[in-house]
Amino acid sequence: MTDTESITHDLAQIGIIRPGQVYANLSVPRLVEAALARGEGTLTLDGALVAQTGKRTGRSPGDKFLVKYDDRESAARIAWGKVNQPIAPATFERLRARVNAYLQGRDLFVVDAYAGADPRYGLPIRLITEFAWHALFAQQLFRRLDAAALATHRPEWTVICAPRFYTEPTVDGTKSETAVILDVEQKLILICGTEYAGENKKSIFSALNYVLPLQDVLPMHCSANAGADGELALFFGLSGTGKTTLSADPARKLIGDDEHGWSDTGVFNFEGGCYAKCINLSRENEPQIWNAIRFGAVIENVVVDPLTREVDYADTSLTENTRVAYPVEYIDNAALSGIGGHPRTIIFLTADAFGVLPPIARLTPAQARYHFLSGYTAKTAGTEIGVQDPEATFSACFGAPFLPLAPQVYARMLGEKLARHDVRVFLLNTGWTGGPYGVGARIKLSATRIMVSAAISGALDQAETYTDPVFGLHVPLHIPGVPDAIMQPRKTWRNPNAYDAKARELAARFVENFKRFEDVSEDVAAAGPRV
């Protein structure tokens, strides 16, 4: 029995009967050829494949559901609510049957891979999709298998992605034409009505956020890199705050740019590729990402000159959430193993749209847990459907849309690991200074890189600091190479009284948001802003 015959048999076992041609685990060149032949994309001057995702150019968190089995343990473990909306098993099965019927006679692309570089925790996965370019995306972003591993691969989790099957809310129990549904009991993910490829990778991340805590592994929405001495740094943050950009440092080895696990032996990458925002991308500011955009890379929703095939990375006419996916080996100094030791430094990235937080501050252990639970940042334009301008938001653990469990579960695990491994933690503002969004200016990337280097090197461990009177943060007064003025945000505003009012407004939002965390220790509850 050939590989394709075996996979076709597997498809029948999950209800996908009589599909068209099944293309299983094609090479990158064949996937590019298929995407071009099927009219799914075009090539750029540098050889990357460009695809457009239509109406959905970002994630649709409001359309995410988890199947709720009232008689299973998962029902008690999952934190049901706005993030994890329940859907009944019978409703899910009806929708699944409709999707399976839709896929009959259609060509399908299958990618077998795994998530998790540490072999003890690697999750065998399979993606089934109607788009060749989605298969290429998965091939480049998940961890790839060699021929021997493919021969024995048995997927534990399966993603069925039907981008052009649009759900009907009155029939399917959904909220729109789009649905992203996780069934943790059947280990099955169903994605409908969206061509945005990022849903595929984030759905597997959500699955890992459910599975790994049971194995005492902390799943993290962060990037990671390591110095020549092997010391790791982690960068937590929502999309657009700088995880990929700051971890792609020519002086340090990249472990991964977005999703990691922290086990008893160290940190490991979940993925085998990177997914970078490329709005206003330039060779000067982000040379490693720029050089990674070549044959095999997949770019979403950029504007390409029809004659020269050059990309205009400044053009936002389709979306500001332009993206590029490429394998991690396209970064020259990447650690291809995807595995490192325990981190010495952790940096929480916040794009402060209020423009009142300092550019960097050292956090106490209690403050670290407070800000991890708070997850304050600004959603950047286009990352999620409906976000046009940066919006101040609180996203627990810097990744609330992907957390099936209560945020306190992940925060407790982080606090224990911070204490056990004596990790220094910083809050880094990659957002605005001199005023809020629309008035002030975004902190320069060059200054941010200097502050990151100082934090990782230990240069800030003994630096003179002042304590912010509102947020209680310990802020360095001086960092060589960074203008002293921006270290004290109040002094960057034309009207100090306007700063005070905006700072109090943000502090009040912190306090109000934190009321939902009732079972935290007193020191953590007291580590927030003073109102």
Image (tube, rainbow, N blue to C red):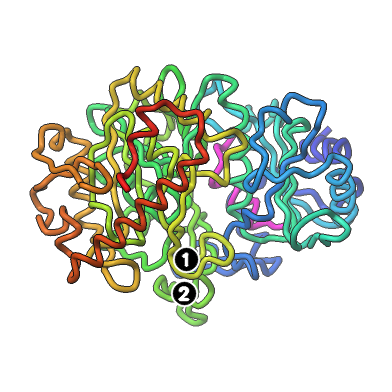
In percent of width and height, residue 172 lies at: 85, 55
Label 2 sits on what residue type?
A: Thr
Horizontal and vertical percent position of residue 51: 59, 66
Q: Amino acid at mark 1?
A: Ala
Q: Circle 1 sits on which residue?
A: 381
Which is more toward the observer, 167 or 49?
Answer: 167
Instruction: Determine the residue positioned at 47% across, 68% down.
Output: 320
The residue that appears at 41% across and 38% down in the rendered structure is 372
Residue 226 visible at all: no
Magenta stretch: helix, strand or loop mostly: helix
Q: Quadrant of the N terminus?
A: top right
Residue holding disc 2? 316
Most extreme residue toward the bottom, as rendered? Answer: 307
Q: How many marks?
A: 2
Q: Is residue 520 above or below residue 467?
A: above
On the image, the x and y values in percent for residue 286 come to: 31, 57
Tell me whether the residue at label 1 lies in contact with that at label 2, contact meaning CB atoms closer than 8 angstroms: yes
The magenta stretch is 131-145
